[in-house]
């Protein structure tokens, strides 16, 4: 019987998110594709250094010590020959990644549904926006100064609106301001919001937590405050999901909380909430990322 990905959490990761490709990118930008091919061939046995998503991916794969829980698949714009170095680097860093798709310059997101992926991470904004525009769960990893440690536990943090939930409430805020938003959320407190782009990813993490509860901790860090906090909690519950922590900050800066929480990955739909001291992912979804809007 052929293997199946139906009962595991599947995450796609571009080499640009998993590894530090700055030297390779510089060669491609300044000297072109042929020089890039020669550079990768010359450095084939030289592993890439870890990138922004590496701490998250390493811990995620480590959960497979408890059973077949996670599959990580490389989705790369590299050609098959220039992609050889990627899987060799994964093996060097003891990442058990065995599946990969190399599309030689084409955005690889169209293969996500075929592989049952709940998330795709890339450092390339255009690839991520194409995936999001197609209704697929994708995020752009941002530059980070995060220093990894030896703690095997995985910490994941999410913004709520535009990430776990859709942007319906955010649209009320954008059009009518805070007071109208608060009134609207109070009136609709028992009506769950529709799921957002990463709802299914959280569902996959929750399934893993039933097996590895002590090894995964999930937090929501949101600008919501009372009374709007109740609809967020009720929505998560209505979806049949749970989180361990919730921070309702009422518009306060998220950076001080994130610096204490130290998540191995944090997802937010607004660039203004992303910081360099933790691995952050921008989800270009919803009204806050509409064409013509300046990033907040």
Image (cartoon, helix red, strand yellow):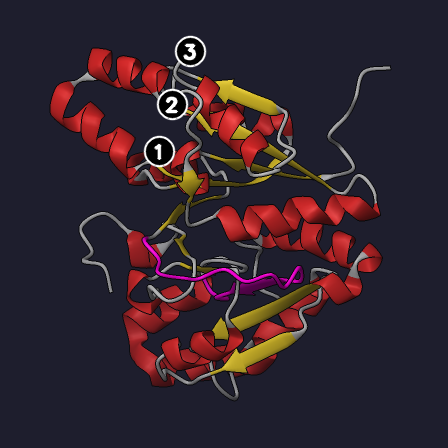
**Residue at the spot of label 3:** 81
The answer, for residue 105, to whether it is visible in the render is no
**Residue 272 placement (x, y as % from top left):** 28, 66
Tell me if residue 150 is in the magenta stretch.
yes
Residue at left offset 83%, top offset 55%? 211
CA gap, disc 2 and disc 3: 11 Å
Q: CA distance from mark 1 to mark 2?
A: 10 Å
Q: Are marks 1 and 2 in contact (CB under 8 Å)?
A: yes
Q: What secondary structure is found at the residue carrying circle 1?
A: helix
Please identify, in this view, whether the residue under mark 1 or under mark 2 is nearer the observer: 2
Q: Tell which of 48 and 153 is nearer to you.
A: 48
- Count neighbours of disc 2 (C-alpha within 10 A) and say few if under 14, some if 14 to 19, many if 20 or more: many
Disc 3 or disc 1, which is closer to the eye? 3
Looking at the image, which residue is at 63% across and 64% down? 151
Callout 2: SS: loop
Label 2 or label 3, whichever lies nearer to me, is: 3
Residue 96 is covered by the magenta coloring: no
Q: Is residue 181 left or right of residue 143?
A: right
Q: SS class of the residue under badge 3?
A: loop
- Judge the density around disc 3: few (<14), some (14-19), many (≥20) Cα neighbours within 10 Å: few
Give residue 274's position: percent from left, percent from top: 35, 64
Tell me the quadrant of the picture where the C terminus can be found. Answer: bottom left
Neighbour class for label 1 at 10 Å: few (<14), some, many (≥20)? many
Work out whether 250 lies above or below 171: below
Please determine whether, in this image, residue 122 is positioned above or below residue 215: above
């Amino acid at each position: 019987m052929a293997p199946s990905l139906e009962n595991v959490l599947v995450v796609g990761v571009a080499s640009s998110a998993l590894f530090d490709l700055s030297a390779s990118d510089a060669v491609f930008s300044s000297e072109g594709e042929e020089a890039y091919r020669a550079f990768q061939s010359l450095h084939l046995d030289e592993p890439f250094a870890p990138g922004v998503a590496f701490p998250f991916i390493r811990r995620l794969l480590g959960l497979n010590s408890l059973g077949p829980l996670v599959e990580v698949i490389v989705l790369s714009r590299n050609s098959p020959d220039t992609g050889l170095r990627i899987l060799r680097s994964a093996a060097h860093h003891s990442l058990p990644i065995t599946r990969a798709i190399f599309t030689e310059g084409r955005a690889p997101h169209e293969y996500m549904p075929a592989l049952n992926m709940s998330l795709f991470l890339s450092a390339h904004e255009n690839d991520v926006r194409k995936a999001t525009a197609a209704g697929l769960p994708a995020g752009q990893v941002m530059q980070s100064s995060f220093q990894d440690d030896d703690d095997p536990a995985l910490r994941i943090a999410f913004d709520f609106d535009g990430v776990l939930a859709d942007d319906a409430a955010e649209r009320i805020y954008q059009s009518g301001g805070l007071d109208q938003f608060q009134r609207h959320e109070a009136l609709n407190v028992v009506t769950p919001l529709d799921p957002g782009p990463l709802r299914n990813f959280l569902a996959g993490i929750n399934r893993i937590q039933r097996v590895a509860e002590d090894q995964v901790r999930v937090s929501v860090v949101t600008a919501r405050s009372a009374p709007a906090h109740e609809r967020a909690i009720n929505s998560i519950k209505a979806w049949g999901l749970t989180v361990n922590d919730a921070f309702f900050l009422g518009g306060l800066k998220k950076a001080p909380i994130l610096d204490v929480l130290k998540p191995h990955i944090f997802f937010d739909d607004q660039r203004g909430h992303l910081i360099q001291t933790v691995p952050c992912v921008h989800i270009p979804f919803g009204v806050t990322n509409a064409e013509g809007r300046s990033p907040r």
